[in-house]
Amino acid sequence: MSKGCLSAEEWLAEKRVLAGIMTGTSLDAIDVAVVEFFQENENQHRFKIIASDSYPYEFSVKQDILDLIHKETTIRKVTQMHYKLARVYAQSVKKLMQDNNIDFDSLDAIGIHGQTVWHEPGVETDTRMTFQIGAISSLAQLLNTTVVGNFREADTALGGQGAPLIPIFDYEFLGTETDDIIALNIGGISNITLLPAGSSMDNIKAFDVGPGNVLIDAAMRVLYNKAFDDNGDVAAKGEIIPGLLEFLQQNEFIYAEPPKSTGREMFGLPLIHKILNDFAQQNLARDIIHTLSYFTAWCIVHNIKLFGNPKSDIIVSGGGSHNKFILSVIQNELPDSRIRISDEIGIPADTKEAISFAYLAYRTLGGLPGNIPSVTGASHPTILGLVARI
Amino acid sequence: MSKGCLSAEEWLAEKRVLAGIMTGTSLDAIDVAVVEFFQENENQHRFKIIASDSYPYEFSVKQDILDLIHKETTIRKVTQMHYKLARVYAQSVKKLMQDNNIDFDSLDAIGIHGQTVWHEPGVETDTRMTFQIGAISSLAQLLNTTVVGNFREADTALGGQGAPLIPIFDYEFLGTETDDIIALNIGGISNITLLPAGSSMDNIKAFDVGPGNVLIDAAMRVLYNKAFDDNGDVAAKGEIIPGLLEFLQQNEFIYAEPPKSTGREMFGLPLIHKILNDFAQQNLARDIIHTLSYFTAWCIVHNIKLFGNPKSDIIVSGGGSHNKFILSVIQNELPDSRIRISDEIGIPADTKEAISFAYLAYRTLGGLPGNIPSVTGASHPTILGLVARI
């Protein structure tokens, strides 16, 4: 009998090794982690990271995904990419396991985020939609293990935004009895989880706060022909363009009450094209990067001021945690906070989301809900995802 | 703990009530069945049909699906239809259960085929693709029960054609020790399952044999502005157009060795447009319907002669089982066969596929494989489908 056919109770009774795969809206990397999870005492979860790494998307795959999202397409192309991604994911997991001499037989399951090609949280429950591709059953067969994916949909069906989903990981593993913690992830989009000292699951908040790397990366590509602003070095040399900052700060999303989530629909190419069209002629390139980076940090700071405690411990993850300029703006604007990159507490900043999706799969197979209604807006907690057994 | 979190053993230990939903390539109906399954002795499955019915697709939904398949589209439209179908499926199940006073709490799970929007069995394993939409997690939440869907993909990942999948139902419930049985389903596409007397699962064959209603229905729409040829009455009044029959009989698919599967890619609108363009001017409409219907029956007959026993018991299901002209051609060409509509042995002809997908879901939740490698060409049997628990 395959491991995927265990009852939830049997699943939770022993240590389980799961791989997690994260591919975000920024399309910058395929993050993979292999993690061991287990229950200590009753319902107290623990984890041990066995290996994690990030692999670049092949240029042609990345381009095809962008075309799928932004251009007219055909159902055949959608289907092709759905299957292609299963093979790309399989290769990435294989590489991580081979490079780290991890035995394939030790793997109990895989959790995949999938590639979001549409996210429209909608107003009415029946206009909410989110769509992640990456063929789950194919991946299960390619790697001969149980795969869980498509975690967001169930939450949207319950009136939630389908995002963010990392907060359950933050709640279980970062929250403390004594300190106010803020988990900040700067991926394509930035999001925060507010974990007041000793809070129960019902009263934690977590939400997208604005762009992460998405605007900076898009502008770097056009202005510098580079994928991203390494260390934030370009931003550090520039100055604010007041008109541009003012224009960006008009975005109502930043001030909206949580729960809220966003994506490329709001902070995508059309916005960058408008910005470059209006500001690139009469300004220095580095000033545009500086202003976009400042705005990115400012969205984080402003949301913490509006909805959190500015004196919190801030634990930063995601590709943007390497951007020293962004972190310095946050520290300047929130002088009483303590900012640490998550590596300092044992969680690789680049693969925290992959680790979290491994954990979400662990919960699903254990019959445990993965969404937090106070975070997503869903009517109640539910088991997330689709499970392919082998 | 939800029922979907039972172990495979626990699932099989008691009677289970499942709904099955079938929507085929012909888009003519949403077939729904509610069926009770149980194990008698060791591994001997039994079923009892509680209710079944067919509901028409709303015209606009049908049109949007056809546009999705045949025209340029956007990822947003694909996502919209994916979610829309979950709501359509939920309504259909609700209607059947309300009309028959079936208690919702009695439902253990649902198996859905989903709407195929692409099926390209490919040559190499990594060019095989099949794509069914209808959002599984949403349906699970809408009806508050476990849902299994996306049954075909796992088989294609093992080098199979992902079709046909009904043969496991035929093998379990129609095969006998004493008679050669052929299960014939005339849906959009026609397929047969060959069940020689006393055969083991390893040596049964099942495959698509050619068009079912797809060509006839398309021609009826254009020539008569009707959805289908009721009873085969139009076909019965026409005569063969030799040139058209000759042209159709040139299709190499008909003669190909099984395993083989086909769909709208081969027998779709482009073919009908070519036929009407070449033959509608100088021929009577009823003669075109007659020839297409004769060809449809001839594909079935020819494949039985090539690969089966012409003296079999033929059990017919699918919408085409109401087409008396088609059945009379088969009886004439195979005079030693005994032809019965499946209703005569207790299986409603219009909903047999829905019943079979309820059974496939029953097997998946019981940790049992659903594909038959001798039928699909897959390298080995596997558990099929994606499971959304609640």
Image: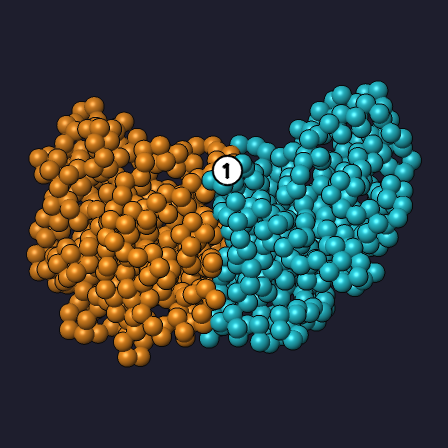
Chain colours: A cyan, B orange
Q: Taking B45 as reference, is B208 above or below it?
A: above
Q: Taking B207 as reference, is A279 above or below it?
A: above
| Residue occupying the point 26% across, 63% down | B170
Residue at the extreme bottom: B41
Secondary-structure class at tag 1: loop
Res A108 quadrant in image: bottom right
Subunit ID for the residue under disc 1:
A
Amino acid type assigned to the residue bearing label 1 in the image: Glu
Q: Taking A384 as reference, is B245 above or below it?
A: above
Can you give x and y, in whole percent of width and height, for residue A20 in the image?
64, 60
Can you give x and y, in whole percent of width and height, for residue B357 in the image?
33, 57
Res B198 quadrant in image: bottom left
State the residue in front, B8 or A155.
Answer: A155
Is residue B149 rendered to the left or right of residue A104? left
Crowd band around label 1 with a 10 angstrom C-alpha radius: few (<14), some (14–19), many (20+)? few
Q: Is residue B21 in sight in this rendering?
A: yes
| Residue occupying the point 66% across, 28% down | A270
The residue at which mark 1 appears reads as A124
Can you give x and y, in whole percent of width and height, for residue B325 in the image?
11, 44
| Residue occupying the point 82% across, 54% down | A313
Is residue B98 rendered to the left or right of residue A111? left
